[in-house]
Image: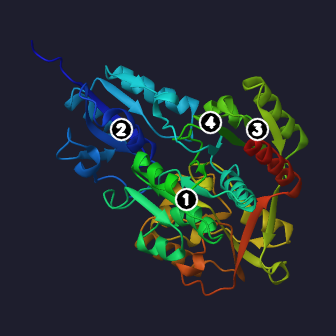
């Protein structure tokens, strides 16, 4: 009897969730043939191949990665039957537009379920995710790791993937020092997530193969902290699922994929930035969460912002540099550096007309950005263009609102001051009590 034909599949992604879904469900599955990945959101990630060393025995030549713009042609040319949507932080309407496009091409559009794509650990897993990029997920993860360490429990963080370089060499990455970021040739976005852990003397894993990563992390941890990316759901099955919502963006907990799934799955929802949000917006977010997930425990938190040597910046002309993903595809018009500048009575210089190269293109792509400079650094050339943009902007000082230490990567000739943000003391105390109860149970 002739074997049934394999279903031909394309996985739409952004160098993260797409590779994980392939590894978990498609890699060794003889019923499917993944003919291509497509890529979007992140610069410089197309034109690569998912390597055969990671793709497995069914793909001896690996799998090509194309720009998402080529999806219609790929579906037609390769007679694709299924298209799997595998990236995050997009509106529900955007997802349905992609579904309509795929359906019009004759293929089936698939949104994989969370249960089918989560790996179970032999250790307890505390996952920290969000309803949007820029809610304060990473500061929450850092605070949790600090608390767990204080309790004498060995914690290891595992970060959502950001494999923007050589995929084969990035299969399993371990970061315990700044030198590890240099060794792995990390982008600014990666450094924003890894450096705050290594500065605390903690270990964080990331990479491409999250099954292999988990095995390594379990060797040196009593508990795994899953530090999610964008508003994606966890890769590991959580024992405690904490989700961060943003009081400055009411309604986004309902409107973005897959953030609403996170809100519905959560054991605990932290409504962050209540100290800078309007009370009616805080209430709106809380009402939406209670409607989506009546059983979730809700914690309200302020994001406490501080500036290194604030008096030296007060009243000056400044350029405000922000975490890249938060203000680009995350959709925020500003971040911590902007808020700090306003609180110090600074005059914020609009960097747009001084931008060069890919930084200028970033402003064109994200027209909602007007007064802040995203910390784009996905290549050495882009880092150079970021440096030139800072140098060209007429200002007295630079406020750096990204968690990465840009002074190690760029020659910033003007006085530069880091802006830091942490959960406030009230929320920290409530979260610490919750964690102690969790470990007692």
Q: How would you rate the neighbour count of disc 3 (Cα within 10 Å): few for under 14, some for 14-19, many for 20 or more?
A: some
Dividing the image into 4 quarters, which one contains the C terminus?
top right
Q: Label 2 belongs to which residue?
A: 22
User: Mark 4 and mark 2: span between their CA atoms?
Assistant: 21 Å
The x, y position of residue 359, in whole percent, is: 51, 65
Q: Earlier in the sequence, mark 2 or mark 1?
A: 2
Is residue 372 visible in the rendered image? The answer is yes
In this rendering, the label closer to the viewer, 3 or 4: 4
In this rendering, the label closer to the viewer, 2 or 1: 2
Q: Is residue 101 left or right of residue 362?
A: left
Q: Is residue 128 left or right of residue 72?
A: right
The x, y position of residue 95, in whole percent, is: 50, 31
Q: Earlier in the sequence, mark 2 or mark 3?
A: 2
Q: Label 4 belongs to which residue?
A: 259
User: Mark 1 and mark 4: span between their CA atoms?
Assistant: 25 Å
In this rendering, the label closer to the viewer, 2 or 3: 2
Is residue 273 visible in the rendered image? The answer is no
Dividing the image into 4 quarters, which one contains the N terminus?
top left
What is the count of numbered marks? Answer: 4
User: Mark 2 and mark 3: span between their CA atoms?
Assistant: 34 Å
Q: Earlier in the sequence, mark 3 or mark 4?
A: 3
Q: Residue at x 85, y 48 (%)?
A: 430
Furthest residue toward left: 1
Q: Nearer the viewer, residue 178 or 383?
A: 178
Q: Earlier in the sequence, mark 4 or mark 2?
A: 2
Q: Secondary structure at mark 4?
A: helix
Q: Label 1 belongs to which residue?
A: 363
Q: Residue at x 75, y 58 (%)?
A: 151
Q: Label 3 belongs to which residue?
A: 250
């Amino acid at each position: 009897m002739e074997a049934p034909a394999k279903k031909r599949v394309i996985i739409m992604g952004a160098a993260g969730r797409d590779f994980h879904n392939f590894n978990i469900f498609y890699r060794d599955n003889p019923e499917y043939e993944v003919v291509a990945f497509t890529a979007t959101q992140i610069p410089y990630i197309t034109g690569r191949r998912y390597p055969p060393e990671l793709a497995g025995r069914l793909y001896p030549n690996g799998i090509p990665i194309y720009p998402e713009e080529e999806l219609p042609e790929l579906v037609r040319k390769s007679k694709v039957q299924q298209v799997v949507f595998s990236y995050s932080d997009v509106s529900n309407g955007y997802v349905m537009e992609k579904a309509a496009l795929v359906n019009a091409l004759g293929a089936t559009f698939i949104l994989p379920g969370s249960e089918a794509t989560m790996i179970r650990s032999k250790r307890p897993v505390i996952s920290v995710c969000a309803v949007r990029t820029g809610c304060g997920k990473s500061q929450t993860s850092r605070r949790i790791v600090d608390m767990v360490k204080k309790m004498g429990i060995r914690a290891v963080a595992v970060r959502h993937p950001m494999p923007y370089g050589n995929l084969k060499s990035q299969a399993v990455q371990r970061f315990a020092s700044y030198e590890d970021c240099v060794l792995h040739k990390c982008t600014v976005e990666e450094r924003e997530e890894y450096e705050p852990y290594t500065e605390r003397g903690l270990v964080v894993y990331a990479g491409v193969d999250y099954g292999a990563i988990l095995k390594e992390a379990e060797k040196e941890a009593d508990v795994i902290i899953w530090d999610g990316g964008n508003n994606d759901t966890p890769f590991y099955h959580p024992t405690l699922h904490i989700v961060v919502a943003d009081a400055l963006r009411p309604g986004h907990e309902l409107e973005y994929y897959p953030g609403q799934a996170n809100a519905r799955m959560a054991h605990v929802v932290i409504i962050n930035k209540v100290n800078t949000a309007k009370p009616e917006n805080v209430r709106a977010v809380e009402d939406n969460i209670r409607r989506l997930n009546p059983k979730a425990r809700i914690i309200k938190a302020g994001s406490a912002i501080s500036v290194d040597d604030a008096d030296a910046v007060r009243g000056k002309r400044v350029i405000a540099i922000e975490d890249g993903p938060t203000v680009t595809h995350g959709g925020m018009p500003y971040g911590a550096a902007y808020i700090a500048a306003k609180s110090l009575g600074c005059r914020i210089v609009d960097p747009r007309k001084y931008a060069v190269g890919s930084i200028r293109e970033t402003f064109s792509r994200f027209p909602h950005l007007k007064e802040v400079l995203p910390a784009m650094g996905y290549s050495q050339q882009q880092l150079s263009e970021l440096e030139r943009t800072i140098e060209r902007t007429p200002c007295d000082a630079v406020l750096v609102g990204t968690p990465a230490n840009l002074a190690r990567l760029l020659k910033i000739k003007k006085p530069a001051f880091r802006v830091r943000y942490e959960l406030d003391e009230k929320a920290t105390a409530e979260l610490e009590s919750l964690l102690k109860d969790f470990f007692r149970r």
